Amino acid sequence: MSTEHTGFCPVYRAIGVLQEKWVLHIVRALLNGEKGFNELARAVGGCNSATLTQRLEHLETLTLITKRTEDSHGKLARSVYSLTPAGLELQSVIDAIDGWAKTHLNAPAPTTPDLPATPEASPC
């Protein structure tokens, strides 16, 4: 099988999007429903604000998430993020990863500063 990618390959492109650091953590956190920026940052855990902002903007460009602004009555406006129908379809990807991990990863991996120790979103 050739590893050369000339032309459009949907799997290659999807892996490129989903492998970006924090992307699947963001999607996973939003599968439980919409979240404000700070709530999302806590749910993802370990991602700095600048990186989270960049990833959210990219996911919005890809139409996987939507952002709306809530008026905070004189305070700074609150940004709220949610998955689009296309983003919600990634539930099956998360479920597949969960199934694979339960079958093939026998012991919990040690926590690292980059990964949340206790993920908020399902399936765990």
Image (tube, rainbow, N blue to C red):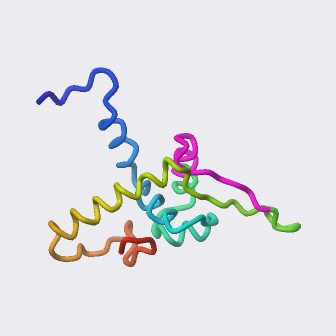
Please give left or right for residue 57 compared with residue 16 in the image.
right
Would you identify the image quadrant in which residue 61 lies?
top right
- Residue 122 in the image: x percent, y percent? 41, 71
- Residue 87 in the image: x percent, y percent? 49, 51
Which image quarter holds the C terminus? Answer: bottom left
- Residue 1 in the image: x percent, y percent? 11, 30
The residue that appears at 44% across and 71% down in the rendered structure is 121
Q: Is residue 64 magenta?
A: yes
Total residue callouts: 0
Q: Is residue 17 magenta?
A: no
- Residue 52 in the image: x percent, y percent? 53, 57
The residue that appears at 39% across and 49% down in the rendered structure is 20
Please give left or right for residue 38 compared with residue 24 in the image.
right
Question: Closest to the observer: 67 or 22?
Answer: 67
In the rendered image, the residue lying farthest to the right is 74
Please give left or right for residue 122 compared with residue 6 in the image.
right
Q: Is residue 3 above or below residue 86?
A: above
In the rendered image, the residue lying farthest to the left is 1
Would you identify the image quadrant in which residue 22 lies?
bottom left
The residue that appears at 58% across and 54% down in the rendered structure is 53
Q: Is residue 45 above or below residue 14?
A: below
Question: Closest to the observer: 29 or 123?
Answer: 123
Question: Closest to the observer: 64 or 109?
Answer: 64
In this picture, which residue range is highlighted in magenta?
55-70
